[in-house]
Image (tube, rainbow, N blue to C red):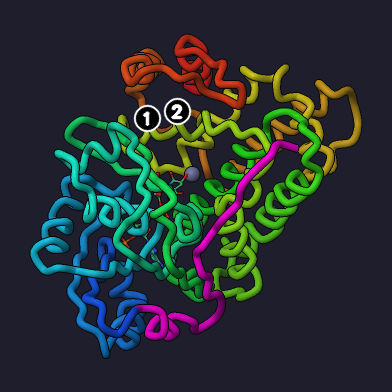
Amino acid sequence: MNNFDFKNPTKIIFGKDSIGKLENEIPKNAKVLLLYGGGSIKKNGIYEQVKTALSGLDVLEFSGIPANPEYAVLLNALKIIKDENITYLLAVGGGSVIDGAKFLSAAALYEGETPWDILSKNIKTEKGLPFGTVLTLPATGSEMNSGAVITRTETKEKLAMGGPGLFPEFSILDPKVLISIPKRQLANGLTDAFTHVLEQYMTYPNGAILQDRFSESILQTIIEVAPKVLNDPSDHNAASNFMWSCTMALNGLIQKGVPTDWAVHAMGHELTALYGIDHARTLAIITPSHYTFNFDAKKEKLAQYGARVWNITEGSTDERAQAAIDKTVAFFHELGIDTKLSDYTQDFEGTAEIIAKRFTNRGWLGLGEHKSLTPENIEEIVKMSY
Ligand code: NZQ
Ligand code: ZN
């Protein structure tokens, strides 16, 4: 196991009807900017619950943060934060609204030339404007981590940012929010969280017995609750286990002491930037070809995952590893998630070359757990996913 530091300061308030607890978490003298997306919270009652809880506070609102939070839209919110001397941000939404809040938290205190620097120069935020979240869509884990991904449509870019100053102060997780989430988004959430675990697990054995079992238990839980969540999102136990699995998949815990990959996300983000494909679906497109391309490097862990998560106990290491990839693809299909780029766009010729070139232009640092994948390798992996 590798050495590690671990600090996660986010307070989690979990459970049925917990949105009202919001009023105890924000300083009474705060000037709050309430951030939300395209309006789902106005249809499902979450907005009313939040407004009631905030009734004693000075609150302004900014709505319209789109899925894959858009830089140009966020700049309008940044203007309000500065003009109105906002002191606290409250994100009510899924990963996109929460990531948008993280960008604003960083940008509000950033003193450089342009807030785009935070993304293009990958500036780590040590201190941001304080913020909390009310999670409305379990998927990304953004509610308990310090990372964010921001899109700039103008240049078809989707870049990551983060830093120790960007953990939410608190996040409210009420599994009742699942009731209004469309099936497509539930399937996305299941796929995204599942892939987050794989990115931190599917590398090579390094003796981290406990972390491996944390990861396997999250994968098993997602597989167990997936059909229940999709069939009946009001099933409280299924919803609770799904929601907590998503948070645990990406709050830093399972990545401590182990090598991590994240190449699937790096390639996936490019597919969203180029074609607007939902984040989770891009992961399902890349995962099978990534594991097939890197089969020799990953087969020990693939076989372990096959045995412990899918009960594949027959055959050689190679056979079990291959069967584990096949099971993963079948699982995505059961969720209703297609796994080939050509299922989403007919305009895919040249995609692999474009992505490889983009990575090269940004200054290639290598991808994968050994940072050994070259742009040529990336090109091949993306081509295999057509
Ligand atoms: O905008 P509204 O109207 O709220 O509708 C949203 C949106 O259209 C809707 N929705 C959310 N909660 C709902 C609901 N509809 C009905 N009832 C509810 N309770 O769902 C749609 C998708 O929302 P979005 O926030 O975009 O989804 P998700 O949580 O999957 O977030 C995806 C974004 O997070 C980034 C992705 O790249 C993508 O931009 N990620 C962030 C990460 C992080 N910060 O750690 C890690 C991830 O790997 C990911 O990259
Ligand atoms: Zn993800």
Q: Which mark is residue 270?
A: 1
Packing grade of label 2 (10 A; few <14, some 14-19, many >=20) is: many
Query: In this figure, which residue is indicated by the disc labeled 2?
Result: 267
Residue 141: % across, % down = 50, 55
Membership of 385 in magenta stretch = no
Q: Toward the viewer: 349 or 154?
A: 154
Report whether residue 28 is seen.
yes
Ligand 2 within 8 Å, label 2 CB:
no
Q: Within the image, what quadrant is residue 50 found in?
A: bottom left
In magenta, the rendered stretch is 1-26
Front-lying residue, 165 or 247 = 165
x, y percent for residue 96: 35, 53
Tell me: residue 353, above or below residue 112: above
**Quarter of the N terminus within the rendering:** top right
The residue at the point 54 percent across, 81 percent down is 16
| Residue sticking out furthest to the right | 314
What's the mark number on residue 377? Answer: none
Kind of residue sitting beneath label 1: Glu
| Main SS class of the magenta portion in the image | loop
At 16% from the left and 51% from the top, the residue drawn is 75
Q: Are marks 1 and 2 in contact (CB under 8 Å)?
A: yes
- In the rendered image, residue 164, in percent from the top left (x then y), is placed at 44, 51
